[in-house]
Amino acid sequence: MKLTDVIRRPLVTEKTSILREDGRTIVFHVAPDANKVQIKRAVEQLLGAKVASIRTSIAHGKVKRQGRFAGRRSDWKKAFVKLRVGEKMPEFLEGA
């Protein structure tokens, strides 16, 4: 799996913005089959920042209806990446 396939996009929500205020935690939408070692390697090589710890969670897709037709959104995975003490957050993620 390529590094750009592991990390899909940063998550920008109200909750993740509060986590980002400490300057060390970044939340990413990652590939569902990526493990912590792959996520750590991708973050360190793509962003150039050392990683202290990673927590992952799986968000289960909701069942959505449109009239009498029901469909299901797919499951997805997010990773909470905590940077080491003294590491700077990348500039393009600070204002997001």
Image (spheres, grey):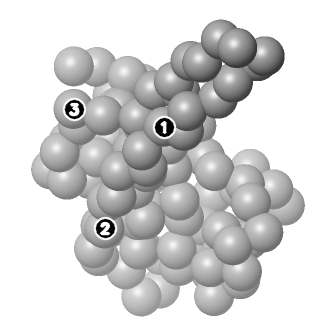
> Which residue is at the far top?
69
Give the residue type at disc 1: Gly
Residue 7 placement, left or right of 58: right
Residue at the spot x=78%, y=16% of the render? 67
At which x and y percent is residue 71?
56, 18
Tag 2: residue type? Arg
Q: Which mark is residue 61?
A: 1
* Residue where numbered disc 2 is placed: 55
Instruction: Assign a secondary structure to mark 1.
Output: loop
Is there any visible trace of residue 45 in the rendered image?
no
- In the rendered view, would you say 25 is above or below 32? below
In this rendering, which labeled residue sits more in front, label 2 or label 1?
Answer: 1
Quick one: label 2 or label 3, which is nearer the N terminus? 3
Q: Which mark is residue 70?
A: none
Please say if the residues under marks 2 and 3 sit with CB atoms less than 8 Å apart: no
Few, some or many C-alpha atoms within 10 Å of disc 3 (few <14, some 14-19, many ≥20)? few
On the picture, is 79 further left or further right than 89?
Answer: left
In this rendering, position of residue 45 left or right of residue 12: left
- Tell which of 46 and 21 is nearer to you: 21
Q: Quadrant of residue 42?
A: top left
Residue assigned mark 3? 33
The percent coordinates of residue 59 (x first, y second) are 43, 49
Q: Residue at x 42, y 74 (%)?
A: 83
87, 16: nearer the viewer = 16
The residues tagged by marks 3 and 1 sit, at their Cα atoms, a distance apart of: 16 Å
Quarter holding the C terminus? bottom right
Q: Is residue 89 left or right of residue 60?
A: right
Asked if residue 8 is positioned above or below residue 25 in the image, the reply reads above
What is the quadrant of residue 7 in the picture? Answer: top left
